[in-house]
Image (cartoon, grey):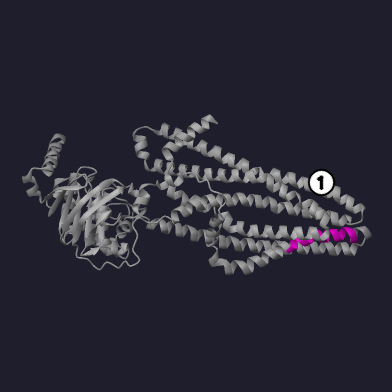
Amino acid sequence: MSVQSASDKEIQKRFVYQDDEELDKGFDWAQVKRLSTYMKPYARQIIPIVLIMMVVGAITKLLNPLLIAYAIDHALKTGDSKTLFLCVGGMLCLYAIQWGANNFRVRFTNMIGQQVIYDLRHDLFSHIQRLSFKFFDKRPAGSILVRITNYVNSLQDLFTNGAVNLMIDCVQLCGIIFILLFINWKLGLAIIVTVPIMFMISTKLRVKIRRAWQVVQTRQSRINAHLNECIQGIKVTQAYTQEKENIAFFEQMNQDNHYHWNRASILNQSFGPIIECTGAIGYCILFWFGAHLIQEGEISIGLLVAFGTYIGLFWEPINRLGQMYTQMLIAMASSERIFEFIDEVPNVAEKTSAQELPKIQGNIEFKQVEFEYEPGRHALKRIDLSVKAGQSIALVGHTGSGKSTIINLLCRFYDVTNGSVTIDGHDIRDVTISSLRSQVGIVLQDTFIFSGTIRDNIRFGRLNATDEEIVAAAKAVRAHDFIVNLPHGYDTEVQERGNVLSMGQRQLLSFARALLADPRVLILDEATASIDTETELKIQEALKTLLHGRTSFIIAHRLSTIRHADHILVLDHGQIMEQGNHDALMQHKGIYHGLIQAQYRFLQETG
């Protein structure tokens, strides 16, 4: 246990995230009610058909023991073969009706259940798409992925059969209790009295089971987060020969998950013996007290046999209800995680009165803009900036100076803490996000290439673009030549993140994608940082075409990229320290001059 605790502490130290802290909540009926809302759209389909099949199946199941009792007391006792034949035939008919009703019900509920799971996964994924960057900054991709896959899947049994089986078992229990008390209330009460004893014994166990399954959900989330991190960083892992360390750490997480899963399973399986022991006590009461009642002439042997059959049928739903409780606990733990994300309010949200941003010219103003990623940690301080339509603005400065933050605010990936950002006089907080971002294009240093064809990746800039427009955009940014030399040209399939392409080729595709989108404002965020000199020379002319007539923001360190910018901002610790064109800043011999000189020295030293 001490070894387990030590490894668990090490794992928590590295992989505990705020959203994955272990929850310690009781059985929450509010969660059940909220989950049930996903079944409401199908209530008209479920209630008439499923309930009818459920009642038919329950009635036919409960009538069989009475036929058995009648056969024993009237057919076997008197040797009446005709009555015995009719009883056997009746039982076969009841079994056939029960089978047909249950088979139809299962098929129907599975279909509805899968539709509910579809709706829930759709809502979760759609909501995640609308969440702000701040949400993703604090959560690993694996932790998000596990909610859309594992946690939603864990609700599948509940929606497909669990809810209906719960109703069936409750109806069956009520029916059995009524029949037992109707046949002989004394014997019925003597047997049913064992049920409260069973529930009293299992109360504490249910609390432990609930907590155990919540811990299991947390451990599985951590494993998924770690797996995603390892896959994304496999090149770094192999480059530094850290495979053994990674395997060892994953082994710790795997053992930790294995331990807690086994513990939850053992606790869960404890329900079975409790029910079996209680059932055994019930049978002892039946035969002891039942024999006494037979001697007193209050019941017949057939009714005693029927009682025994009903007791077997009685503990069957009790056992399923115990399993159903565990299923509900797993569903509660999963739904808590799922609804945490669905309830997450985007930090950047549209106002109810937000209007569509009309086609813009590209006049941009930052007025006394301040921004904090975290309270008390300023990323920008009192930024004032006025950009006229068609101007190119270069942002330079050391890492962490605030260059990317200005871009993030302009795209409204984050909202300003103080001040305002306007485009053509429109405060970007007063317009719809889609109408803003549809007119702002961005090319990042780490270009993301989706799985699919080259053509599909370029078309991502404008989904209704024709093939001719795609080829024209590729030619304009000098990407056409390398594309046609690929095995299938524009229809060449690229793997996830475009690993079959070079860094330069991926960035050329991103240029084509941006040109195809035809934005009024274009942002180049270190877009040529990873392109070799020869490739950069090829795209300089393409950049002139790309930037022509557009307001552009360029983050770059290379002199060739920024020296022709209309205006250069030198940032340091979130403040504008210098601004002007290249020649004016070089004459000033301030920070910008120092950066350029340092770059020249580096180029000379590296040859």
**Height in image: 52 above or below 339?**
below
Based on the displayed image, in which of its 4 quarters is residue 272 positioned?
Answer: top right
- Residue at the spot of label 1: 284
Which quadrant: the C terminus?
top left
Q: Position of residue 568 (x, y in %)?
A: 14, 51
Residue located at (29% from left, 65% from top): 431
Q: Is residue 448 left or right of residue 571?
A: right
Q: Which residues are magenta?
A: 59-74
Q: Position of residue 116 (x, y in %)?
A: 53, 61
**Height in image: 275 above or below 178?**
above
Does 79 lie within the magenta span? no
10 Å crowding of disc 1: few (<14), some (14-19), many (20+): few
Q: Position of residue 377 (x, y in %)?
A: 28, 45
Name the residue type under label 1. Answer: Cys
Q: Is residue 441 left or right of residue 306?
A: left
Q: Position of residue 143 (x, y in %)?
A: 44, 47
Residue located at (52% from left, 51% from top): 334
- Secondary structure beneath label 1: helix
Based on the displayed image, in which of its 4 quarters is residue 557 positioned?
Answer: top left
The majority secondary structure of the magenta stretch comes to helix
Which quadrant: the N terminus?
top right
> Can residue 148 be seen here?
no
**Height in image: 264 above or below 96?**
above
